[in-house]
Image: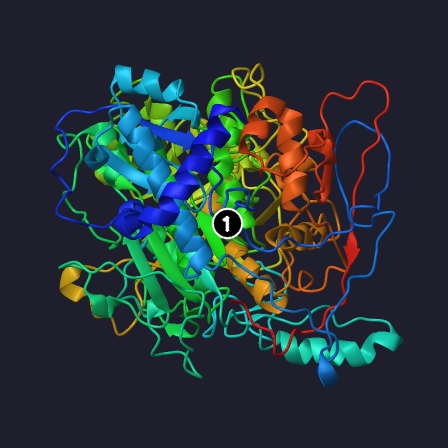
Amino acid sequence: MTMAGPLLLRRAALAVLVLFSLLSVLLAEGDSSASSNAGTGSASAHPVYLVHLRAAAVASYRGGVEGLPATAAAQADPDTTGAGGAGSGSGASSLSQPGHSRQSSFGSGGSHGPSRVRLPRVDMQSAAVKSYMGYLAFLQARVMEDAAVDPSSVLHSYKVVSSGFAAALSPSQLQQLQQHPAVVAVHRSSTIHMLSTRPSTSFDWLDSVDSGNLAGSANQTRHRRGLKGLQGRRGLLHVQRQQQAQQQALQQQQQQEGAQVQGDGMVVGVVDSGIWPEHPSFSDKLISPPLSAPPSSWKGRCEPTKDFPASACNRKLIGARVFYQGFQEEVGTKDWDLKGDWLSPRDSTGTGTWLAGAAAGSANVPTAPVFGSSIGRLSGVAPRAHLAVYKVSWKSKTLGGNVASTVDVAAAVEAATADGVHVLLVAVKWDPATTYFESLHYFNAHLARVTVVFTAGDYGPPSTDAPEYRNVAHYNPFGLTVGASTTSQRYFTTVTLGNGTVLQGRGMGGGTIKPKLPVVAGAAAPGNVAAAPYCKPGSLNKGVKGKVVVCIGGRVLLVDMVQEVLAKKGAGVILLRDNLVAYDTLIPYDARLPVVLLLGSERSTLQEYIGGTASPKVTIAQRATSGAGEAPAMLLISSTGPVTDPSLTPEPAAPTNDILKPDLIAPGVCLFGAAPGTVAKAKMKSAAVAMASGTGVAASLTAGIAALVMQSNPAWTPAEVMSAMQTTADAVSNKGGPIKDAYGADATPWAMGQGHVSAAKVVDPGLVYPASSDDFYNFLAGQDATKAAEVKPAHLTLAPIHAFNLNRASISVSRLQGSVIVKRRCESHVYCGCRGAEWG
């Protein structure tokens, strides 16, 4: 910090103590709502910037300004003297059995065993926080005045997870702010796409699912969501039953307590496209016993509008807000497409509704039949948790749908943290941050005791054609990054050729309407010779009417193939691929005709039959279902590490491969969830459903599990929650072999992180790897000492560390030359059920 910085801060502190009452109106600057300002912005687009001040945010302020006490949550007390195992090697590895540990100190738990006390959180209603927020408001006003920035032009004011503001700036204003002694950095905002979960509501190809809960039931061994240890109406099951004899008494208690872990008292926040509040998954009427009121720490609200009345919220859905100011300024009002959308928390795309329902939707929700098939009942992973949604994505006429501004996303993280969420799911497809210092709002949310869950992204493994988009989406260590895996569910279909040969395919649809239908290769019915073999849109001619069409996969989305065949009135689709890659990426869609995948020799047999037969015919049988497939395996579209974008490597504090990402994987293909209805049919007696696939699906399930872990262990920090989920993850499939990637090879840690999330074991990991705020500051100092010195607490002496020495539950050394010493610190924990403990 420069000399000018402390002088300005001291003077500002004295001023704010005298003028606080006059400045209190500025405290609401950071609030964003669906106000009459919407649509009144500039018709053309303008560059938007996020201005970071040197002053600490509320979540990280430890004191140092005269007259203003600290506001940061009380520090955890990790053992800073213990050293983990040391070693050297190349590549990435996982930690499950560290070399050294210490026993944690627990408070007295009475007859129910040891119980840790509640972990303090930032008290937004405290006098200290209010005073410090007034101080930050004063600082921001001074900086705006110095740079001639009109306060009315400020889009967002940040005080809790960041210290600064967002505004459209002129070149002159930008230059003045970049040179201002109270400003540490100015970052250009950008528009980004939120993650699409690819929801679909057409399932005529699905088999009837057993009545009951989609997450499985106590006597089922295969779970629709593939999560070990989940039971839909109960949330998280107890920890592993097989314990040593001396732990049997503790085991019985774990089982009793675990059955009660359903998310009570937790608030799960979702940053995405909003919510359809009338869906039964978000009703508090179906929950028994009734939900309690939100925790005392909850300070959020619902923002009512004409199409989102105050009655839309209840004890399940306790928060709903919108953030559009940055988007409106960056794309301009002429490009903002509100047709079919609402300037309210109401969801128009379905993604936010699906994610919220999967993470924390109510249990035992009856569903509407889908093309005559029952799909049982819906349940969120944490069915008794409260929900808060933060709508940030909108539609642009030029950029398409599900687009958000990075300053709006930061504002949503700010609001969610101030509101008091415990878990925050951020469904952003791609994080444009090129340094860790551009992700400090996530760091400060972490310090405020919010467990942040990120999506890994849906672009698949890195490739040379688009490396910048195919890297894992979130590199920063301040949250849990989740990739997507498959489940054991398989759909089989036979294809019988006219000569009697039976081919085993993988089927998604029903059978052909009658036996022995003519079959034709797409290449033989071209409207476009080059595109017809792949059944690209507009490529087939009318000669396919009434015929089963054979399409070569690999260049066109399956949904587009099917739509093309439907448009030309074909009778079915046979998709040909060389290997199994396509199987695990078959996404549900409007499959109103049979769809079968043939691989390898089956593919060759069909092609030889068609080529050598004058009038080839096929019969596609009804699908058969099996839950005995090997799983999990990596979903092809799940983005992976390591970071390969060359544009990131030259910068200090650029994403480093010494931080292993993703952290773990979870089910992410063809899962049921909540879907929006229509305004005319807003009151639903049974739930509209959709199927979805992708890393957003996986992250939503993981967010629900995180809520259950936090409920079970109210004294754990987010770092400990993440550690427990990582070290208890499974690296083997249900067949006992290693988890495979989409090509059949063993998946690496860069694809699956620590492995597949295990809900059954995560409550009792045995050991956790804690990381204090000092650890993270020292990590930042190891990336860029100058910038770290500007954002660190005033009285903290930095001790820079290599990224691979950040106390995480994984080890990655990306540029190993010779040997290095890698240190880890761990704590041992005994599961106690935490009866009587509560979260603030």
Q: Quick check: 331 above or below 275?
A: above
Visible in this render: residue 798?
yes
Q: Quadrant of residue 542?
A: top left
The residue type indicated by label 1 comes to Ala
Q: Secondary structure at mark 1?
A: helix
- Asked whether 78 or 337 is in front, the reply is 78
Left or right of residue 653, residue 378 in this image: left
Left or right of residue 436, residue 51 in this image: left
- Asked whether 96 or 503 is in front, the reply is 96
Q: Position of residue 654 (x, y in %)?
A: 57, 23
Q: Position of residue 513 (x, y in %)?
A: 31, 53
Visible in this render: residue 430?
no
Q: Quadrant of residue 488?
A: bottom right
The number of numbered badges drawn on the structure is: 1
- Asked whether 642 or 149 is in front, the reply is 149
Circle 1 residue? 699
The residue at the point 50 percent across, 59 percent down is 422
- Asked whether 504 or 393 is in front, the reply is 393
Q: Quick check: 699 above or below 242?
A: above
Q: Position of residue 218 (x, y in %)?
A: 60, 75
